[in-house]
Amino acid sequence: MARKTRTDVRTPRRTFWFRTLIAIAVCGTAAGGLAVYRTVSADATERPVTVDEASRLALSRLNLYQASPVTVTLTATEGGGVVVRVSGVVDYRTHRGVGSYQVTGAAGAAAGQLDHGLVVWDSGGLGLAPAPEGDSGPPWQQAEHVPRAGWSPRSYTADPLDAGLQLLVQLGADRPDNPLLLAQSGARWLGRDRIDGRSYDRFAGPRAQGTAPDAGPDGGRSPLTYWVDGDGTLRRVTMRMAGLGTPTTVEFSGRNGAAKLPEAPWVAG
């Protein structure tokens, strides 16, 4: 089956900044005193996290790990009106994901679906393949039917999709973060939202190690925003990228116990 390559819709490369994202996600130690509020007024605006909030944010990565495999949806804007959406599952015990992807364009000559297929990824890179014709099963089952030679593997780039997949596979952890270090590193409460009828606190993640509190146009705020409920369950993460007005968004929809991820089918051998 003919398939367009990513170069058909790829935007110019941006500075590769995955090390910064990982430093943000796992919370590096930052200089300065502990900034944790123990009480919160009903009309509070953006502020440092409370003790309880820091604890829930710190627990969210462990909860994601324990819920594996989890259903995920990633939406990345590549620029020029091109949007890539990945729907699949991630197993944080193996740091591996599999899903189907669709690339759509803006209004005009490139409107509609530009490309689609299967994607598999881990901490080292990703692989793309056409979906098997006539197979309407979930993407992890379809991936098992693609021979190794049918995958197009590559390392990660600085494109928004690649940065989103690379971040996504690192979000779960087999232990909670240190809540005090999260607070010291600049995690902030931004507000409260309802998603599908449930209340979630919205947090700015900790700053990258070495970032001054007032650095840059965002006041040194992390490019990552987390939505976490009262039990420490992570529902959504967004990631802002330089030059793009729309952040990359990851949605988590809970455990999918039926999913069985393929054994790294994009690896040759």
Image (cartoon, helix red, strand yellow):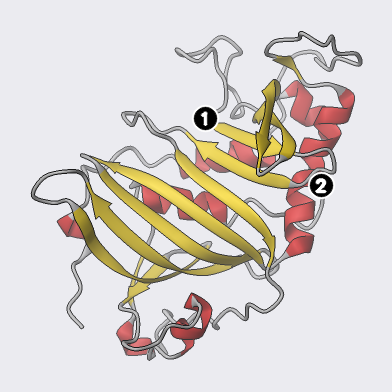
**Label 1 sits on what residue type?**
Pro
Query: Residue 244 at what x, y percent from top left?
Result: 33, 31
Query: Residue 116 at what x, y percent from top left?
Result: 30, 67
**Residue 78, label in figure:** none
Name the residue tied to disc 2.
Answer: 176
Quarter location, residue 169: bottom right
Measured along the vertical axis of the image, is residue 18 above or below residue 48? below
Residue farthest to the left? 109
Query: Residue 19 at what x, y percent from top left?
Result: 51, 42
Q: Is residue 188 left or right of residue 167?
A: right
Quarter location, residue 39: top right
Identify the residue at image location x=54%, y=67%.
97
Query: Residue 60 at what x, y percent from top left?
Result: 76, 45
Q: Quadrant of the C terminus?
A: bottom left
Identify the residue at image location x=51%, y=84%.
141
Identify the residue at image location x=38%, y=91%.
147
N-term mark: 1 or 2 = 2
Q: Is residue 186 visible?
A: no
**Label 2 sits on what residue type?**
Pro
Identify the residue at image location x=34%, y=53%.
84
**Residue 223, label in figure:** 1
Q: Is residue 92 visible?
A: yes
